[in-house]
Structures are given as C-alpha cells and as structure tokens.
C-alpha cells in the first residue's frame, strides 16, 4: 500500500518534480479511452527518466507488495493502464528518446515513451517506415503499442507490432534487468521472449528499451473508394481482391450507419443510400506493379456491381481518407460515449459478422456503426451509448456479449488489436478454454510471483 514512506522513497528515486500526489492529478491517471470499466484513483504517479529508476521502483513495490500500473499515452481501449487499486502508475513521457536509427541494419532503438508518429517522422528522413499505424499513432507510445501488440490500417499487407519488434530491455517483476533479441535478422537462441512480451499488456515486465524493425518506405501508391448497394457485394470484393493475389496496404470498410453519420458530420460528399463503402490503397516500390494492382481492384469492384472513384492527386487521396478519419469522431458526437469493440473474424466471414451486428443493434434497439479493417476481418462495431442511462447500458452489455459470441462462433477472436485488459477479461475463457487460462496463470505466477505488475488485467487469476 502507498503511505508517506512510499511516496518519500519515490521522491528520492525520481526527484520530487517527477512524482504526482495531488488528488486532481491522480484522478486524471485513473482513466484511459475505455468507458464503463472499473477504475481506482492511484496512490501516486511517477515518471522515470532511466531504466535504473524503473528497477528501483519495482524493488520497492515488491518489498511493499504495491501494484504497479505501467502507462503510455492512456489510449488503450480495453482498460490496460487503468489502476484497479491504490497502486503506483508509472508513466513513460520522460523516457521518450530515439536512441539510434541504424539504416544499414534497418532498425531503430527507442525508449518506450516515444510516440509512434514521431518515430515514423524520424525514420522517414532515411526513406524508411515503421509500419504499425494504429489510428491513435499521433499520441500512442511505442511502449504502449508493444504491450498491446497494436495493429492498424496497414495490417493486411504489413502485419502488426509483433512483426516489427526485434528485441527489448525489460525490468522484470523481480527487479532484474533482462535484455533479449537484438539487431540480427535471425535469432533462435532461447525461448522467443520478444513474442512473449509483445502483447503482454504490462503484466509480465516493464519495457524500458525497444529495438524496432524498419522497412524501405513504398515509393508509389494508389487509393480508391468504392460504393456498394449490397453488403454481400462489398464482402465478395474484399475476398476476390485477395484471391486474385493483390494484397492492398489498406482495405477498409464502413457500413451504412457509419457512412450516414460521417456524411452528416463531415459533409465529405459520400452517397448516403449505399450499404457499404470500401477504401482501398495499394502501394509498392514499382510504379507498374502498383498500377497493375489498382487496375485489378477496379476490375473486381466492377464485377461485384460497385461504383468507384480513384484519387489522381495527393489532395484527392487526402479527401478520400478524410471519410475514414472522420468515422470515429462522427460516431462519437452522436451520444455521450462510444464503446469501440474489435471482434475479428476470418475474412470470408466478414459479411456474416456485419449482418449479425446489424441484427443485434435491432434486437437491443441500439445504434451501432461498424467500420474497420475489412482485409483483416477486423471490425470495429461502435456502440453509441449514454453511460448514465442504466437501462440502456444493460442492453449494451447484452449486445456486446452477443457480438463476441457471434465472432467466436464464426471462428474469430475477441480482439484483433485492442487487447483484453479488464474490459474483455470475462470472455477470455470462451476463446482459449480452461487450459489456456491455466497456462496463462502459470506464466504469470512464474514471472510475477507477487502479482504486482498490472494485476487484474489480461490474466484472470481467479475463476
Ligand atoms: C482513437 C483511438 C484509435 C485507436 N486505434 C487503434 C488501432 O488502429 N489499432 C490498435 O491496435 N489500437 C488502436 N487503439 C488502441 C490502442 O491499444 C492504443 O492506442 C495503443 O496500443 C496504446 O498505446 P498507449 O501509449 O496509449 O498505451 P496505454 O494505453 O497507456 O497502455 C496500453 C498498455 O500498455 C501497457 N504499457 C504501457 N507502457 C508500457 C511499458 N513501458 N512496459 C510495459 N507495459 C506498458 C499498459 O499497462 C497497458 O496495458 C486506438 C485508441 C484510440 C483512443
């Protein structure tokens, strides 16, 4: 527990200017971007400047059995950094240095508090790209996205965060400093610790340094938007594109509710009588191959009764993407809060999932707009809610239960990118079964025997 002695020790470790104890400040660290989840006001918030300070905090927390809640930018959509008891929040805003960009080994070594977009701006000067691009990349940190194994719009072609992490430095719950992986393209020494820690949601160790893999930035791209009066045609376009061996960098979908809400909000010129739109971007290093891929997409759109518009200039591309960028803000202004889920299904089940969400919306008399990464089968059914309306929230919870039930019955997963955190903990057993839960508990207990790191997240410790 946190008392005056604990806080004095924190001030000694971090310097008084890097320790927050004021109630108003502490309250702001009891939130992330997830509405309607349990939360507690932390006892103290600290901002380390180096690994040694993180280590000293972990040793202090272990001695006093104090929970530690690691925090990046607090954009988690599953309650990841939210304190569940009066523990200590450790924020990484001051460990935000890009330590090295190595264009010969195609790596960047960074501290966890580096913002994803800033990393990309820095490597762009070398003609390089760090592909993971969550919608939150202008604020989300590399540490937070590593802990969540975040994905993004480029996931279909370029993969997600786990594909771009080559090594790490981690402060273990015992206080040991553990470095693994490195700059080599190949490394099969020992267990694959990198993949164990990516996506571990701050429950197994505190990440203090990260080696990221970079790729040459594609030189050419072509964007288009396509409209469909039947959901089935949009879904078939998605699968036909991939079946014809075109892997777009982005292949996004918006349903009718989202299209109408975006148009109402942003007036970007979308037709409001269509059932779905697809936003497609192909990219690559060769102009001819990019044009061939774009032509193939157009051919497939036409075969599936779609109409389309191709962006000929960067300005036209920006205006096409404005619709996608407006999706969440447009939905968010309809009601006081949004619950943004990320149930994910095999690509071939996309339409089944979209139809199921529409039926669930009707059944519970709720407004749900669905958009998302169609190419990955990763949809974002977005429930527009008023958390103060108890009766509505009861319907919302039932609707969310059913959305996950359908996703699993279609061979999908609870989360394509937002993680389990606290928000989806109760559903975890439905996907990974008893043996999955037991295996996670054993890993957690082996690495964090005192259960001090982000307790109550990702791993259900009790039935
Ligand atoms: C508008 C919006 C759009 C989004 N779009 C996407 C998207 O397209 N794709 C996607 O995947 N996600 C998306 N997200 C959610 C996504 O999970 C986060 O944006 C991102 O992964 C979290 O980064 P963060 O720095 O905010 O971390 P936080 O939210 O602060 O923390 C996330 C998790 O990381 C842990 N953590 C943080 N730092 C460390 C560390 N140094 N060591 C160990 N654990 C740590 C925390 O304990 C927590 O469990 C979106 C969120 C918002 C609000």
Image (spheres, helix red, strand yellow):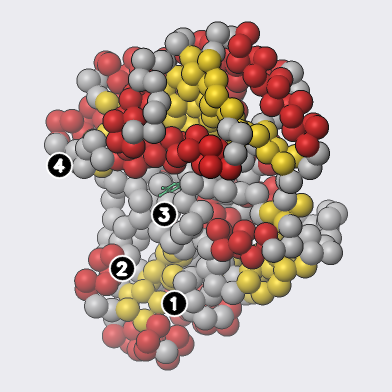
Q: Secondary structure at mark 2?
A: loop
Question: Could you say which is closer to the camera, residue 366 or residue 258?
Answer: 258
Question: Could you say which is closer to the camera, residue 177 or residue 378?
Answer: 378
Residue 250: give x, y in percent of width and height.
60, 35
**Does residue 380 appear to the left or right of 210 in the view shown?**
left
Are circles 2 and 4 on residues that touch, CB within 8 Å? no
Crowding at label 2, few (<14), some or many (≥20) Cα neighbours within 10 Å?
Answer: many
Q: Nearer the N terminus, badge 3 or badge 2?
A: 2
Mark pair 3, 4: CA separation: 22 Å
Question: Could you say which is closer to the camera, residue 60 or residue 124?
Answer: 124
In the rendered structure, find residue 75 and report the number of the disc placed on it: 3
Q: Residue shown at 60%/39% (left/top)?
A: 313
Are circles 2 and 1 on residues that touch, CB within 8 Å? no
Task: Give the number of the mark in front: 1 or 3.
Answer: 3
Q: Which residue does the numbered mark 4 point to in the structure image?
A: 388
Q: Which residue does the numbered mark 1 point to in the structure image?
A: 47
Q: Which residue does the numbered mark 2 point to in the structure image?
A: 42
When the figure is inspected, residue 71 is found, relative to residue 432, above or below; the finding is below
**Can you say which quadrant of the picture contains the C terminus?**
top left
């Amino acid at each position: 527990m946190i008392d005056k002695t604990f806080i004095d020790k924190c001030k000694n470790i971090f310097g008084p200017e890097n320790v927050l104890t004021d109630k108003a400040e502490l309250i702001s660290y009891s939130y992330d971007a997830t509405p309607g989840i349990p939360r507690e006001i932390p006892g103290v918030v600290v901002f380390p400047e180096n690994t040694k300070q993180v280590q000293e905090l972990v040793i202090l927390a272990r001695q006093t059995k104090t929970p530690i809640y690691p925090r990046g930018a607090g954009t988690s959509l599953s309650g990841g950094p939210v304190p569940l008891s009066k523990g200590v929040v450790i924020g990484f805003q001051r460990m935000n240095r890009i330590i090295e960009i190595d264009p010969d080994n195609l790596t960047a070594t960074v501290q966890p508090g580096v913002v994803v977009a800033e990393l990309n701006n820095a490597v762009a000067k070398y003609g390089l790209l760090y592909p993971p691009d969550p919608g939150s990349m202008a604020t989300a940190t590399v540490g937070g996205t590593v802990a969540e194994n975040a994905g993004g719009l480029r996931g279909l072609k370029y993969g997600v965060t786990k594909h771009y992490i080559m090594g790490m430095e981690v402060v273990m719950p015992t206080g040991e400093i553990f470095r693994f992986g490195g700059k080599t393209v190949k490394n099969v020494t020992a267990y694959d610790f990198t993949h164990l820690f990516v996506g571990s949601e701050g429950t197994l160790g505190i990440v203090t340094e990260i080696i990221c893999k970079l790729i040459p930035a594609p030189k050419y791209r072509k964007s288009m938007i396509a409209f469909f009066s039947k959901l089935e045609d949009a879904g078939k376009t998605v699968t036909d594109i991939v079946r014809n061996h075109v892997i777009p960098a982005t292949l996004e979908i918006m349903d009718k509710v989202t299209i109408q809400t975006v148009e109402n909000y942003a007036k970007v010129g979308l037709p409001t009588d269509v059932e779905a739109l697809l936003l497609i971007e192909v990219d690559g290093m060769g102009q001819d191959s990019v044009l061939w891929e774009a032509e193939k997409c157009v051919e497939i759109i036409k075969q599936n009764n779609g109409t389309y518009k191709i962006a000929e200039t960067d300005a036209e591309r920006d205006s096409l993407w404005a619709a996608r960028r407006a999706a969440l803000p447009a939905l968010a202004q309809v009601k006081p809060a949004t619950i943004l889920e990320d149930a994910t299904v095999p690509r071939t089940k996309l339409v089944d999932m979209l139809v199921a969400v529409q039926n669930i919306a009707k059944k519970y008399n709720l407004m749900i707009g669905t958009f998302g990464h169609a190419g990955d089968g990763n949809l974002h059914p977005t429930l527009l809610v008023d958390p103060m309306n108890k009766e509505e929230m009861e319907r919302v919870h039932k609707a969310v239960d059913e959305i996950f039930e359908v996703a699993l019955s279609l061979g999908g997963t609870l989360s394509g990118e937002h993680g389990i955190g606290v928000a989806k903990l109760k559903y975890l057993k439905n996907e990974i079964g008893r043996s999955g839960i037991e295996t996670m508990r054993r890993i957690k207990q082996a690495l964090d025997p005192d259960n001090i790191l982000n307790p109550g997240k990702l791993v259900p410790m009790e039935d």
